[in-house]
Amino acid sequence: MIPLLIECHTGQLVPYSFICQHLMDNPQQVWVGMDVNDGREVEKDWICEECLNNFESGDTLEEVISPICIDCVKILKSEEVI
């Protein structure tokens, strides 16, 4: 079973999303939301368009995604290019 919370850098246990490494390295690009249905308290995980193309071609995302607390997601996502 997947954990519902992770420890944030603040030491608190908080909900999280999975985000691809490309968005963490460069948040100033288009963010593609992937619906979450595993019981976590978030609606979306986030990947970039390159990862979406790879995923749609049958590649796995396991090696390029990491869990990030929702507070950090909000900070990174504020730099998104729409």
Image (cartoon, rainbow, N blue to C red):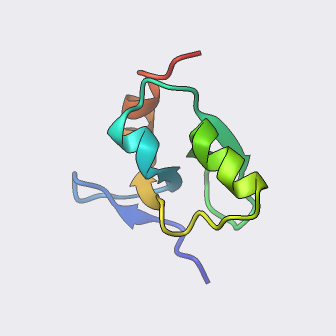
Q: How many callouts does the rendering have?
A: 0
Q: Residue furthest top?
A: 82
The image quarter containing residue 75 is top left
Which quadrant of the view contains residue 41?
Answer: bottom right
Q: Nearer the viewer, residue 2 or 51?
A: 51
Residue at image location 68% in from the left, 46% down from the top: 52
Report the front residue among 33 and 74.
33
In percent of width and height, residue 80 lies at 49, 23
**Residue 39 position in % (x across, y down):** 69, 66
- The image position of residue 49, as x and y in percent, is 62, 37
Instruction: Mark yes or no: residue 1 visible.
Output: yes
Towards the viewer: 3 or 12:
3
Vertical placement of 45 versus 77: above or below? below
- Residue drawn at x 46%, y 29% is 77
Quadrant where the C terminus sits is: top right
- The one of 17 and 4 positioned closer to us in this rendering: 17
Q: Going 60% across and 48% down the picture, which residue do you hit?
A: 51
Residue located farthest toward the bottom when viewing the structure as drawn: 1
Q: Is residue 44 visible?
A: no
Q: Is residue 82 above or below residue 29?
A: above
Q: Quadrant of the N terminus?
A: bottom right
Identify the residue at the far left of this view.
10
The relative height of residue 70 versus residue 2 in the rendered view (above or below) is above
Relative placement, left or right, of 58 versus 61 is: right
Q: Judge from the rendering whether residue 22 lies leftward or rightward of residue 43; answer left or right.
A: left
Left or right for 14, reference 81: left
Query: Residue 7, located in which quarter of the rendered image?
Result: bottom left
